[in-house]
Image (cartoon, helix red, strand yellow):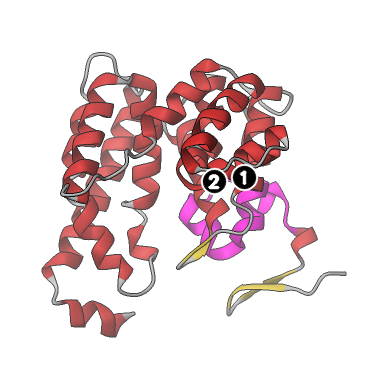
Amino acid sequence: MENPIVFDTLNKMDPASITPDHVRGLSLGRVTEEFGTIGLYARAVDTFEQHGLTDNNLVQLAFQLGLALHADDYRTNGHYTDHLMRVTLHMVEDFGITDPNLIAAGPLHDSFEDHPRDLVLALTGEKPATREEAMVLGRRALAALTNEEVVSIIESVTNPPVLEGQNKLDVYTAHTRELVLGSPKGRVLKLADFIDNAGGNHATIGDKQRKLDEKYVRQFRIHKMGLFLPNSLIVGEERQRALHMLSKGHMRALGRLALPPETIAAAS
């Protein structure tokens, strides 16, 4: 039997014993804190089953490919695949998204930006000489595995390169604004990504937390306004929920930024 994994000082469990019953009904943040990556995976499996996506080949292949591409990636507070799963779950559970193409783009949303060469290697067996070549080949191969719309959604949320002389934050902000205005489906995926990154920044460990707050604080307004656009795919109770999540994350970020940096460092 595998050694028990310790997620916190009070919770020791054999990974094989974690079931959907352990994680059903909990917030995604609490699932992450109490049950880790394995708990998020159990939650995703259960959510897919509840929404009729267990046998959806497109969603399942995209989900597993995303987990494979980022299998060795980590953040300051956990495994990178946690982020991919939470983004996907935010769309399905919190935003009421049922479109398989949009859901499939969730676990792959960072593939072009972070792993273009690995994407090509996984789907074709080829080893591109340059990142530029990998982007072209990866797009073609991923479209063959999924479809053109999935790839277009992923492309819409992929951050553009920052050219010499450009301000990175200005480029990021302009891209977010253009995306929110121009791509209803990309807007949903970017919102899920943003809520997990910015809304969940309270869990980031170390100096990076403040840097991310400074990056994200200007974006909350853009995403909020996007939810009021007439072509918003997030409506009704789901829209209210998304707005509340953004407001909560924004207030937390403003509170942290109001404190001297040394106060945050001492607390962490």
Q: Is residue 6 magenta?
A: no
Q: Quarter of the image holding residue 52?
A: top right
Task: Give the percent coordinates (x, y) of residue 108.
Answer: 54, 37
Q: Amino acid at mark 2?
A: His
Q: Residues within 10 Å of mark 2 (few under 14, many from 20)?
A: some
Mark 2 in CB contact with mark 1 (< 8 angstroms) = yes
Amino acid marked by disc 1: Asp
Q: Is residue 259 left or right of residue 88?
A: left
Give me the residue at 17% from left, 47% from top: 166
Instruction: Tell me the quadrant of the picture where the C terminus can be found.
Output: bottom left
Residue ID at (43%, 35%): 94
- Element type at marker 1? helix
Question: Residue furthest toward the bottom?
Answer: 266
Position of 172 with respect to 187 (left or right) is left
Residue at 21% from the left image edge and 23% from the top image edge: 228
C-alpha span from label 2 to label 1 = 5 Å
Q: Position of residue 47 (x, y in %)?
A: 62, 36
Q: Secondary structure at mark 2?
A: loop
What residue lies at 39% left-to-right and 65% top-to-bottom? Answer: 203
**Is residue 23 in the magenta section?**
yes
Against 213, residue 151 (above or below) is above
Quadrant of res 200: bottom left
Residue identifier under label 2: 115
Q: Nearer the viewer, residue 19 or 92?
A: 92
Which residue has dot 1 on it?
118
**Which residues are drawn in magenta?**
18-43
x and y percentages locating residue 30 in the rendered image: 50, 58
